[in-house]
Amino acid sequence: MLTDSTHYIVTYQDAIDLHELVLEASGGRSGILNESSLLSALARPYCGYFDSIEEKGSALLESVVQNHGFADGNKRTATMLTLKLFAHSGFVLEAVNEQDDLGYGLEELVVALASGNTNRDTVQEWFKARLKPT
């Protein structure tokens, strides 16, 4: 288990900024649908229950995807926020083998979370196998 007490804390401003970038790059409706849901999603990884970076990342990804804080772009924004958490905490995702397509794999996980076909534990294990310190 990758554990570090100095993990980056994703902020509300991070979420707003990355959401805007996501919409500029790929389109969609702007705006916050439910600010309380967004704030709850952003706080969940830091509630004291999650210690490792893969636990925090999976909690953040699941919460932002499922809480629907934004009018549009929740899955894309959740992905970017999770990658920011990893990068600013000193971790990077690396393929486990030559056939492991990180982009496709991460997209599949996010879609599965959104549709209820997977859960945080599965995402956590996927991250755990691929997260490496920089």
Image: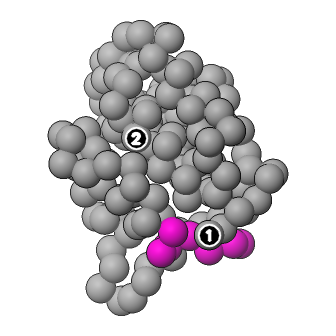
What residue sits 25% from the left and 51% below the top? 118
Residue 1: image tag: 1
User: Which residue, given by chain and number where applicable, does mark 2 sit on?
Assistant: 62
Q: As drawn, which residue projects farthest toward the right?
A: 6
What residue sits 65% from the left and 33% below the top? 47
What residue sits 61% from the left and 47% below the top? 50
- Quadrant the C terminus occupies: bottom right
In the image, what residue type sits under mark 2? Answer: Glu
Q: Position of residue 27 (x, y in %)?
A: 30, 30
- Compared with residue 90, is residue 59 higher up or lower down, i.e. above or below? above
Q: What element carries label 2?
A: helix
Q: What element carries label 1?
A: loop
Q: As drawn, which residue projects farthest toward the front?
A: 49
Is residue 111 visible in the rendered image? The answer is no
Is residue 91 visible in the rendered image? The answer is yes
Residue 38: image tag: none
Hey, which quadrant is residue 12 in on the image?
Answer: top right
User: Label 2 vs label 1: CA separation?
Assistant: 19 Å
* First to last magenta residue range: 128-134
- Quadrant the N terminus occupies: bottom right
Name the one closer to the observer, 43 or 30: 43
Which tag, 2 or 1, sits closer to the chain's start? 1
Discs 2, 1 touching: Cβ within 8 Å: no
Magenta region includes residue 42? no
- Compared with residue 119, is residue 78 higher up or lower down, i.e. above or below? above
